[in-house]
Amino acid sequence: MTIRPKLFTVICFLFTLSCYAQNQHNIDSLLGLLHKKIHDSTRANVYCLLTRAYWDYLPEKAMEYANQAYVLSERIGYKPGLGEACHVLAVLYTDKGNNIEGIQWNNKALQYQYETKDSTKIYNSYYALGLTYYGIGDHEKALKYDFDCLSYFERTGNKADMAGIYHNISSIYADVGKKKEAMKFLLKAATINQVTGNKDWLGRNYFMLANYYMDEGNIDSSMICYNLSRELFLLLGQKDIYAMNLVGIGRCNNLRSNYKTSFDSIQKALSIFREIHDKNGIAWSYNNLGQSFTRQKKFKDAAICLDSCLRLCKELNKTEAMRNVYQRLYQLDSASGNFANAYIHYAQYIAARDSVNNIEKMQIVLNQQLRFEYSKKEEKTKAEQEKKDAVQTITRNALIAGLTLVMLLAIVLYNRFRLKKKAHDIITYEKERSDNLLLNILPAEVAEELKETGGAKAKHFDNVTVLFTDFVNFTKVAETLTPQELVNELHACFKAFDDIIGKHNIEKIKTIGDAYLAVCGLPLADELHPKKVVQAALEIVAFMQNRHQQMGNKTFEIRIGVNSGSVVAGIVGVKKFAYDIWGDTVNTAARMEQHSEAGKVNISGSTYELVKDQFHCEHRGKISAKGKGEIDMYFVV
């Protein structure tokens, strides 16, 4: 199911999708097919599948494959591929906020889908058009496409998509103020999700129903729905939505004057939001605590909560939320007799309210402009088509004798155009590939300097932390594996290391056989470099321990060394560019690794001084290291 963006003041739900790593096996398999000799239509289908595999994680990559699918399908006249490529391009443009392009590509998709009589894909395009028209505020057309889809899903018995359409129709009716109609369709969605056992979406349906009932003042029904949603998300382990339900339950109890129960519920939600670092949730919790304390005339506590909420709203740049907080502060000041502050907060509330109203008016105007521009494009396209039809009719009637010559000339010109377009596409594609390859080899700043000047100067960096890893029993394990198994295992391990250091913004330098070298603090300075590297080292150790439990003796044990200091970094050579680092800091990191133990992170005294307040470390004493003398070493526990 797909959920529309909401214009409510309550939380907007989104799907939690599978991570990129879980898709990687499918992506690798598809990429492998492209290196084989396959039919062009199959190749176009593979491009489309790669687009769908990438579009939630790397939309630019998805766009690249969608365009390749479109170009190839057009060249071979493969209409199913053209329809699929146009549909995917429509979704990608819509996701980028370019709704007009989305509508145009969806209409192109429909042309090919009508020709191939693919009902499923036709209604997928209708579904997407409903979402896109909703995005530009054209509720009438959005409802038209949604009801067309609903009719099809009802005929085919597709319960899951029926529930999704019910939810989308509910959103439209809620936006235009028809709350009863909105609730009716939302209840239909909930009924289907209950029958099909879709607990995730059933919980979301209950949450939205709870908010509808709250707006109507039906506290009993709202409380029931919040509790049902809370139980489902507790079972699913989705802490953020579970906590939002706790806030809703707290609001209901507050309106019932059950202040102790209300406080306990919201306080529990606040603890969860802090645990998952959800600032929106924290602000929402403080807002409702402030309202509750105001009702109880605990004005000091109310002021503390509302001030905390306001600070977070300013930090998050939430204008509409700030308007709500200023209103709460104005009510608090009025209730406590602080009329001077009440006047100030009332003025701030009015200013925030006007700002929100202006934003909403600007959005309405923008949506109207978008619809007007699209109408103009449709009219222009229609006029051009009519003009072409007239010219073709006159030409056919008046120049029958020269038809063959005209057709031959048209074919020559068309083929020339296609060749030029294909050449341009190839050049663009190859340039993008070379840029991406350069970024895979060099840091972005160094790559940009190299493209602009043709070279990159070596630079000195004072504050960096170097990570060095090595596999303890590499030779022994390698003897038990085939060459391909050995390469596959190294790839799996190093890919995981790449993901971990990428998460912490650490720069990978290179792999040397079974060793792995990375550094944090260059080419851009990072004051958290020691903490990030030690944290990444611990995660690498944990990954290898888990993998050893799964693979047994078919994988390796790891030891890691970390050192902090200064290095020189730059590009080596003029062919097969290699970005590298040099200096005593790197050599010491290597010594740290050599004197580490399997499954341990060994850090130098310089790194220890930087992280001793953040990690528990075990002093190993001074240990003699080759070429370095005795060095203080520590295991990170």
Image (cartoon, helix red, strand yellow):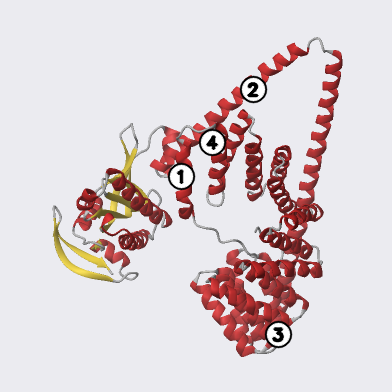
Give the Cα separation between the discs numbered 4 and 3: 61 Å
Give the Cα separation between the discs numbered 3 and 1: 57 Å
Q: Label 2: how many residues lie within 10 Å, few (<14), some (14-19) or many (20+)?
A: few
Marked residue nearer the N-terminal end (4 or 3): 4
Q: Residue at x 82, y 54 (%)?
A: 140
x and y percentages locating residue 575 in the rendered image: 33, 31
Is 330 on the left-hand or right-hand side of 276? right
Q: Which tag is nearer the camera, tag 1 or tag 2?
A: 1
Task: Give the labeled residue for mark 2.
Answer: 417
Is residue 459 in view?
Answer: yes
Q: Nearer the viewer, residue 596 or 118?
A: 118
Task: Give the labeled residue for mark 1.
Answer: 29
x and y percentages locating residue 620 in the rendered image: 19, 68
Q: Nearer the viewer, residue 561 or 489?
A: 489
Label placed on residue 255? 3
Type of the residue with mark 4: Arg
Give the secondary structure at mark 3: helix
Q: Residue at x 58, y 34 (%)?
A: 41
| On screen, residue 315 above or below 265 | above
Marked residue nearer the N-terminal end (3 or 1): 1
User: Label 1 near label 3: C-beta < 8 Å?
Assistant: no
Type of the residue with mark 2: Phe
Marked residue nearer the N-terminal end (1 or 2): 1
Is 14 on the left-hand or right-hand side of 592? right
Type of the residue with mark 3: Leu
Q: Which tag is nearer the camera, tag 3 or tag 1?
A: 1
Task: Give the labeled residue for mark 4.
Answer: 43
